Image: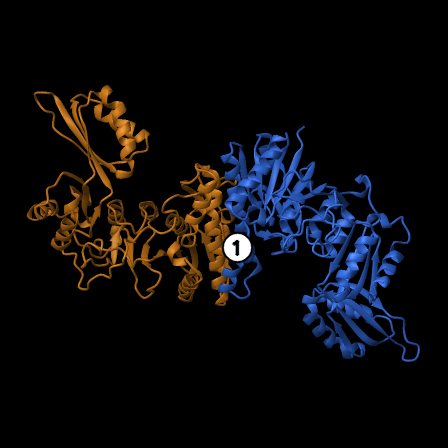
Chain colours: A orange, B blue
């Protein structure tokens, strides 16, 4: 039986007709390798921005349902154009939007989750020898309402399709060349990883590496779909393969270093040391859809019988957080609420740290040698994060990248801008 | 029971966000009149041109199926934006594309005909008090393929919806103020008609008045849907109402005068006078999708036992026609093939000419008085067309407009450009 490869092209990879032609050639190359190909496409370059601008012109708070109707047209354009470009090269291609094949989602607009993907039509068309071009980012509910999947949506569409079709691999074509040991703009000897595990990628993604949305990696992990992140414009470069740890041949204790500069730290001081106070704080924050990352509760002070709770949030949630805490302050008898935005979370990630002791101490020692004060620490099985002053973030990343032997032989090619998440 | 009004806004009436806001206000005005409103929208202004240009960049002969997938996104954008604009004014609106409500068509791409429109969802949403915004121009086949309706498609969508919903009226909002007795650029005393019958409108449309596509008028006639053509920008002007003759209060013998400058005349000379030759010529032309308009066959010449066949075609079919005739020439033993592009078809149209004799002779006399030579004549129940030299067209229209008393009291407002058919 022929193998199925799912390919995904993000917005920058189909930004204009020249780039669509390039994508068509990439698709055909995979077909010529003897594989069946299903291609998932995002909206062209700035289409989404343009549509959002018109919507805001007409309605400051457009309904989520109509926004989904509007934004889904972006992928409608790119799938038809890519199918035409493939046909121009003499190959048989057919485009489908999400309702046509049945990418079924929950009935939630603007951030629906995929429930099921019907594969009958896809398999029938593949059997006819057709290359299939599918609209990413969009879905449909049982009663025919159009939904969108939110941030990272097209990556998630591609991975979910690969899972549903039991595909050999899902290739995410993008404008970066793969996953790096750290941000090449911070460490010029950052090296591209040939392989990384889902777990490591997830921790790196959460830690601020913007190559793939965590959601798509989680889906890939759940269904064990090998995921390759690679450049749309350097086809001979295989990029980075993301797969299960059990399939990886070798791995270093630390796979990558990441810095997240988008957090803010809150300290709620002098809280009575009695049960339920922390629960109250975090349940109120959760109700406001505020995600809390690191949390530290100090030991209770003997004399006052109070303690402090410190935690980090995304800086964009700062206003909402302060408002929520001010509303709770009297009820929980808290003292001052302190805010610190000049912080950075520096993380090392590696599946190899599970069975190798001493990684944490190496991290702390390295930071100490650099005179970097650690404000908070949090750990998971495969990640250690330290909160440091923002001004120390670069120095910290550089030192950790070096001490964990992540430097490549060749200097990584540094792009002018951060590798941003593509399209939708 | 509340009455249903179907409104249709063409591409120029939703060309930008300001115009969409204007359309929203027009919709709300009708809702405030106490009616249920279903709005059909074309793609915004030049969206279709832009999409076609990208398609041609990628593929010189894009497949009709993918063109339909591509072009249908244009209406997808405008329905969502119009729904948002209506919502911004505090009214409940919901947009639907053709597959969502079930505008079922034949399985033919780029010029499908509507077979059926499901109304369950529409009626349910109207009952909830919602204003419904529907994508014009598009349809869906039984097996979920997206189709488009071709030229005049959105007008046809609107009329078909009005018929399916048993609507009170279908209002076509456009950038002209109604149907005129003739082209205001030719005769400056052309007057706007308050009423015109379907039959007259059809003959005028075919005769070169580009306000409505004949197909939408035919559909309106078939289902007896009153059709109003009116300006998007002058809401107090009721435009022209198109309806069944039986419903019209009064009508003049001649409702309008039209000139069609886009035809060419072909004469196939010296054809043997035997049965089947004409049939052969016209069946071969039909196979090439060439529409023939006027046809005249001369009496057979006694001595040579041959005759001539003259007919008119659309000038854009000229090359195809010559090629077809050259291929037939030997087989049918024809002589020369003569071509004349400097011709114009001048027509008078009026349901009133059925029971009033003498209209034709008045037409011929009027042209003779102007020194205009008539090259061919064709007639229907409510139309008389004369083929004249192109240079005489204007003079002929002006004289006919005057003799049949079509001049308005006020001079019609002349637009800079011909009233072209809008969008798709």
**Residue beneath the point at 53% across and 50% down:** B74
Tell me the quarter of the picture where residue B397 sits: bottom right
Residue A392 in percent (x, y) is at 14, 46
Tell me the quarter of the picture where residue A5 sits: bottom left
Q: Is residue B65 left or right of residue B276?
A: left
The furthest residue to the left: A369
- Residue placed most toward the observer, A262 or B144: A262
Q: Is residue A106 left or right of residue B272?
A: left
- Residue placed most toward the observer, A338 or A42: A338
Residue B340 in percent (x, y) is at 75, 71
**Residue beneath the point at 66% across and 29% down:** B2
Would residue B111 be visible to someone looking at this image? yes
Element assignment for label 1: helix
Read off the residue under disc 1. B70
Q: Does residue B347 lie above or below B233 as drawn? A: below
The furthest residue to the front: B410
Picture quarter with the N terminus of chain B: top right
Q: Is residue B139 left or right of residue B291?
A: left
Would residue A10 be visible to someone looking at this image? no
Q: Does residue B282 lie above or below A418 as drawn? A: below
- Residue placed most toward the observer, A153 or B192: B192
Residue A18 in percent (x, y) is at 42, 63
Residue A346 in percent (x, y) is at 18, 45
Tag count? 1
Mark 1 Cα within 10 Å, few/some/many (few <14, many 20+)?
Answer: many
Chain at numbered mark 1: B
């Amino acid at each position: 039986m022929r193998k199925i490869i799912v390919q995904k092209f993000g917005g920058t990879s189909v930004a204009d007709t020249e780039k669509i032609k390039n994508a068509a050639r990439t698709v055909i190359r995979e077909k010529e390798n003897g594989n069946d190909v299903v291609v998932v496409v995002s909206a062209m370059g700035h289409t989404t921005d343009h549509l959002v601008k018109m919507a805001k012109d007409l309605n400051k708070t457009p309904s989520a349902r109509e926004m989904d109707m509007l934004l889904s047209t972006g992928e409608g354009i790119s799938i038809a154009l890519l199918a035409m470009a493939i046909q121009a090269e003499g190959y048989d291609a057919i485009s489908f939007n999400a309702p046509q094949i049945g990418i079924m989602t929950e009935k939630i607009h603007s951030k629906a989750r995929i429930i099921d993907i019907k594969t009958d039509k896809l398999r029938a068309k593949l059997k006819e020898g057709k290359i299939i071009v599918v609209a990413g980012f969009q879905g449909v509910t049982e009663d025919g309402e159009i939904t969108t999947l939110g941030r990272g949506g097209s990556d998630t569409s591609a991975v979910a399709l690969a899972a549903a079709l039991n595909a050999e691999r899902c290739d995410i074509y993008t404008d970066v060349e793969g996953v790096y040991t750290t941000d090449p703009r911070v460490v010029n000897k950052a090296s591209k990883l040939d392989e990384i595990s889902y777990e490591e990628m997830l921790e790196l993604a959460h830690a601020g590496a913007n190559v793939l949305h965590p959601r798509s990696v989680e889906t890939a992990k759940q269904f064990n779909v090998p995921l390759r992140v690679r450049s749309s414009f350097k086809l001979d470069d295989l990029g980075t393969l993301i797969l299960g740890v059990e399939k990886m041949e070798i791995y270093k204790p630390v796979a990558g270093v990441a810095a997240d500069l988008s957090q803010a730290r809150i300290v709620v001081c002098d809280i009575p040391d009695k049960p339920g106070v922390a629960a109250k704080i975090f349940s109120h924050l959760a109700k406001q859809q505020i995600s809390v990352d690191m949390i530290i509760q100090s030991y209770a002070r003997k004399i006052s019988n109070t303690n402090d709770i410190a935690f980090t949030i995304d800086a964009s949630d700062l206003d909402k957080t302060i408002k929520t805490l001010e509303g709770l302050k009297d009820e929980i008898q808290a003292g001052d609420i302190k805010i610190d935005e000049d912080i950075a979370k520096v993380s090392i990630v590696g599946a190899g740290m599970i069975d190798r002791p001493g990684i944490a101490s190496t991290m702390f020692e390295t930071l100490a040698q650099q005179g970097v004060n650690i404000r908070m620490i949090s750990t998971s099985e495969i990640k250690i994060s330290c909160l440091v002053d923002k001004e120390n973030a670069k120095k910290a990343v550089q030192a950790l990248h070096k001490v964990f032997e992540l430097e490549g032989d060749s200097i990584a090619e540094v792009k002018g801008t951060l590798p941003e998440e593509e399209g939708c």
